[in-house]
Amino acid sequence: MSKSVPSSITKTAPRHARKLAKHDKVLRVIVIGLGVQSQKDHIPAILRRKDLEIVALVDNNDRVLSECNEVIGTKSFQKVRDAVRDTRPDLAIVSVPHDQYFEILEILASNRIATLKEKPFAVTYAEASEIISLYKIHDTYLQVCVQRRFSRLYETTKKLLESIGNVHSVSVEYSLNLNAHDMASGWRANRLVSGGGAALDMGYHSIDLLTYVFGAPDKVYAQLSYNSLGGDYSIDDTMKAMMTYADGKINANVTVTKISNRKSESIRIYGSEGSVLVDGRTVCLYDKDSNEVESHSFNSKQHEVDEQLDQFIDACMQDKGLDTKDQNFIDQLSNMRTIDAIYKSHASGKVMNLR
Ligand SMILES: NC(=O)c1ccc[n+]([C@@H]2O[C@H](COP(=O)([O-])OP(=O)(O)OC[C@H]3O[C@@H](n4cnc5c(N)ncnc54)[C@H](O)[C@@H]3O)[C@@H](O)[C@H]2O)c1
């Protein structure tokens, strides 16, 4: 459960800030789940726009609900169904524990409310397929939050890859420094609620970036560590995976861990003519003699959250339904297939062939 700090909302979205708007129409949005992610990213991004009005806040924790509403000042509800019936929103932004999504999405889809849902797409590939059916039947738009795709950092990374010839090797490391007490607290600790830890919850972003740049993997071999710290948690705290992309021409190793001694995020990509290294918020291009050619730092994450919301609003304004041919959407489904393969590979000790 999040510690409610609604001052974070006011800090990042001052009431008198210049607001963004591409459209004259004002869309009615409900925000479902008012924890860390909504307070840090979604609500401030909504408040930065003129073309959105928050018509309802929904959270099943009364304290969080009333603290947020002191800042926003709108209708509040503990149940999504009541909020939808009472306020008839155009859009919904949903950030809840992973086992809570399906029931909420059923209500939103059946009321034709365009939905921006937090990652992961689902807890399994099978659940993702059911979610697609829901939105398809009701011809309603659905977008999954993967804001790194909208960042200048990864846009630049993708561009720099054009300078390094044929990519042959990729190495990804993503770590948090949580202790046994941290690992045991909140809904993420319980595998039945979160659906998975290092691979599903934390690894989703790393896997999505690989899909974004290289497409779907051909093969996956993975090993997971469960409960390494011996605390009261049942999720995988560390994931190590080896994958191949581009018909085996690119090999990638991915380490995602919640229990390192430091927080870090790095990607190294090696090609026949040079390499590209992303370390934190900086990306560098090296030539084949390892001389640095260029380096770019992007410190603000606000841009990526705004761009993600902008794409969602554009789709809603065009009254788009679910487009299963959209590459971004295909990629999200591919992420779920990859994550399923990671858990299956660990359980069976086998290489999973995704072709
Ligand atoms: N894109 C990112 O970088 C990023 C970062 C962190 C979390 N997330 C995702 O955001 C989602 C939420 O994570 P969080 O860290 O904000 O969690 P959190 O625990 O801080 O917040 C979840 C909120 O949902 C509420 N809630 C639970 N069940 C509900 C229900 N049925 N109806 C309404 N409200 C309900 C809880 O009371 C809580 O306030 C997850 O899907 C997570 O994977 C994404």
Image (tube, grey):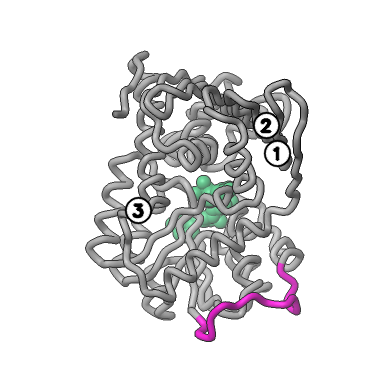
Amino acid at circle 3:
Phe
Q: Earlier in the sequence, mark 2 or mark 1?
A: 2
Residue 116 percent location from the top left of the image:
46, 61
Kindly indicate the quadrant of the structure image that contains residue 336. top left
* Inter-mark Cα distance, 1 to 3: 37 Å
Q: Is residue 204 left or right of residue 49?
A: left
**Residue reaching furthest left?**
137
Q: Nearer the viewer, mark 2 or mark 3?
A: 2
Is the Cβ of the residue at disc 2 closer than 8 Å to that at disc 1?
yes
Q: Mark 1, mark 3: which one is toward the viewer?
A: 1
Q: Quick check: is the Cβ at mark 1 less than 8 Å away from ligand 1?
A: no
- Answer whether residue 25 is magenta in the image: yes
Query: Is 327 colored magenta in this rendering?
Result: no
Q: Earlier in the sequence, mark 1 or mark 3?
A: 3
Instruction: Kindly tell me whether residue 238 is visible in this rendering.
Output: no
Q: Quadrant of residue 91?
A: bottom left
**Residue at the image position 73 percent from the left and 53 percent from the top:** 300
Q: Secondary structure at mark 2?
A: strand
* Residue 13 numbered tag: none
Give above or below for 185 relative to 15: above
Image quarter in which the C terminus is found: top left
Report if the CB atoms under discs 2 and 3 are less than 8 Å apart.
no
Q: Work out whether mark 2 precedes mark 3 in sequence or the reverse, and give the earlier one.
A: 3
Label 2, residues with CA under 10 Å away: few <14, some 14-19, many ≥20? many
Query: Circle 3 sits in a helix, a strand or a loop, which is it?
Result: helix
What distance separates the C-alpha of mark 2 from that of mark 1? 6 Å
Which residues are the magenta region?
Answer: 13-26
Q: Nearer the viewer, residue 157 or 60?
A: 157
Q: Which mark is residue 102?
A: 3
